[in-house]
Amino acid sequence: MQNILKELEAGSLDRPKRLKAAKKEGKKIIEYIGNFVPEEMIYAAGAEPYLMCRGGEPEPPDAVLEYMLRFMNPYARSLAGYHMLGLDPVTPVADLIVAQQLDCHIGRISEVMEYMELPIYKVGVPPDWKKDYTFDYYHKALLKLKDKLEKETGNEITEDKLLEEVKASNAINERLRKIDALRENTECPIGGTDFIKLNHYSFFNDTEYMVEALDKLIEKLETEEPKFAKGTPRILFAGHIVAVGDYVVPRLIEENGGFIAADFLDEGIRWYNWDVPVEGDIIKNIAETKFLVKTPVTLFQPAWRERVDYVMKLVEEKKIDAVVWYQLAFDEIYDMECTILAKNLGEAGIPFLKLESSYEYSREAMGPLRTRIESFIEAVKEAK
């Protein structure tokens, strides 16, 4: 199992090198920000996509402070910060950066990127998701994105090409669901930290290779020794985003006696529980799946009732012992939802821990963080 994970990690790290080689051969490199930007459309245009989703380090968020207020979450600030520090190998060669416009954090950092004369293209995602005209707006935004990609690449996005990419993406989702299903048994060979990393690897490895690697991994996991003992507290890990490289918190949970048996994150992982239908108008199917079918993201309002119900469903179906909520500093909407979720879980007798990160993982910060997580898991064990 570890060999496959290492190969996928190596493939992810090598992605910028492959992109630069592809650019020399005439391919367009298109970065994108957020799950509401369909990578399937970028592939179907004959371009190479690259998800901007790096985080977990304190220096990049601070690098942008001369251009904006501190009161934006560290993930959003990192998107420009890595580039400003010369640590982003892809942005300097990107032909286009497609950014979803759903919250003020990504919106402001998009403006900073525009000021830096980076090739930004914005895709509007209205948060008033229950109003009919907002879905129409998002659907039309994807149609405009199609036109933009075709103009940028000189290639037509045909229904057949898009269908092929959607099927490939669905195939990855299917295999991730099979691996996720293994976590229904606590004596599981793979933990939540590795599962989150698998999601990340799926964005940076070629689709066909990723499907083959996941098939091999599933076969290996069937005979792999359990990583967690029976009785280990089963944790639901929920919140905003685990960026690429920001693995400290999930790792500490599993190093200190917990097992991340389920996840509910808005960004940074694939929405693997929701496949795009392959019959009919494919772009409309993509829009409906992301905007209407999938459990709404926190920034869709009003959505707290639907989201709380979904969390309670996960708690019941996945036999969850406790919930760890992970949010970023200055994520005000997530902070509001955290209060509501904590109240509902408290009434149901489910232990709840809120953790907030500014990507400051110094030795001084790590001690208290580790202690909080360790104490929480010990309390959950005693209550079982």
Image (spheres, rainbow, N blue to C red):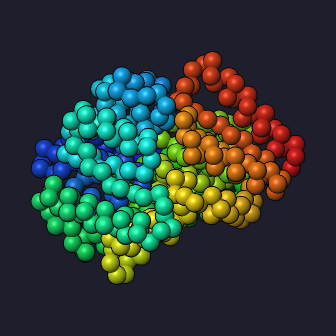
Q: Position of residue 342 (x, y in %)?
A: 73, 48
Number of numbered discs visible in the structure rendering: 0
Q: Residue 175, how many percent across, how many down?
A: 49, 64
Residue 286 appears left or right of 184: left
The residue furthest bottom is 280
Identity of the residue drawn at 68% across and 22% down? 367
User: Would residue 132 appear left or right of 91 to someone viewing this image?
Assistant: right
Q: Residue at x 67, y 59 (%)?
A: 308
Is residue 260 at least partly visible in the picture? no
Q: Nearer the viewer, residue 198 or 124?
A: 124
Residue 256 visible in rendering: yes
Compared to residue 271, the image places residue 55 above or below, namely above
Residue at x 65%, y 62% (from the top left corner): 305
In the image, is residue 94 above or below residue 80? below
Foreground of the two, 347 or 220: 347
Measured as percent of width and height from the top left, residue 321 is found at: 77, 52
Relative to 66, say whether 236 is above or below: below
Q: Relative to 261, is 255 above or below?
A: above
Q: Position of residue 224 (x, y in %)?
A: 61, 54
**Residue placed at 36% from the left, 22% from the top?**
66
- Spot the residue most to the top: 364
